Image: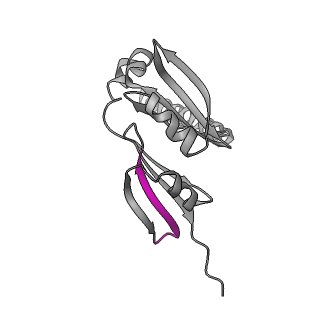
Amino acid sequence: MRPFLMPLVTLVLVFVLSSVRANSSQEIKSMNVKRITPVLLVKEIEPIVSFWVDRLGFTKTIEVPEGNKLGFVAFQKGSAEVMYQTYASVEKDAPSSMSAEARKGPTYLYMEVDNLDAVLAAMKDVKIVMPVRTAFYGMREFGVQDPGGHFITFAQPVAAPQH
């Protein structure tokens, strides 16, 4: 009778695990993502503020001081949002397993806009790291490096040819 016990236990485990996996998949399918917001890490936030507010027309929606400087800030324009946090703030705020990774490199953002020429004009004295080009995937785009060292590509769809 014992030889039948192991296959029975295995069958029960397979049934239970597949049931858990199915419920987990249903939960994921029913989860509604409301927003994904990048949090970019920088040495200092102050040089970033005018880049987003003055050049790009974003509103500063959250500001968290850290001593006599800023430790965290959020900018928003319409449904677009970007956040910045200092390395020092992350090191205090996040578990060491996360904060140890904080200084590993810049982030790359890709922002679709409706008036690329206006953004280009607003970036007139910012270092252009990718000149204006039209990409094979139908986007006219250019790239800059923000004052915190992160790369941002601004893009606008190219009008489809009229037949």
Hey, which residue is sitting farthest bottom in the picture? Answer: 163
Q: How far across and down, in percent of the image, does residue 53 sit?
A: 57, 38
Q: Residue 40: within the magenta?
A: no
Q: Which residue is drawn at 54% across and 32% down?
A: 12
Compared with 50, 65 (above or below) is above
Please give the count of numbered marks on the rendered protein.
0
Q: Residue 144: within the magenta?
A: yes
Report the span colored magenta: 136-145
Q: Is the magenta stretch mostly helix, strand or loop?
A: strand
Q: Residue at x 69, y 40 (%)?
A: 30
Q: How far across and down, in percent of the image, does residue 146 sit?
A: 42, 43
Q: Which of 99 and 9 is in front in this view?
A: 99
Q: How far across and down, in percent of the image, does residue 47 sit?
A: 44, 33
Q: How far across and down, in percent of the image, does residue 122 sit?
A: 52, 51
Compared across the picture, whether 61 is left or right of 153 comes to: right
Indicate the colouring scheme: one colour
Compared across the picture, whether 7 is left or right of 32 comes to: left
Q: Can see residue 79?
A: yes
Compared with 91, 27 (above or below) is below
Compared with 158, 59 (above or below) is above
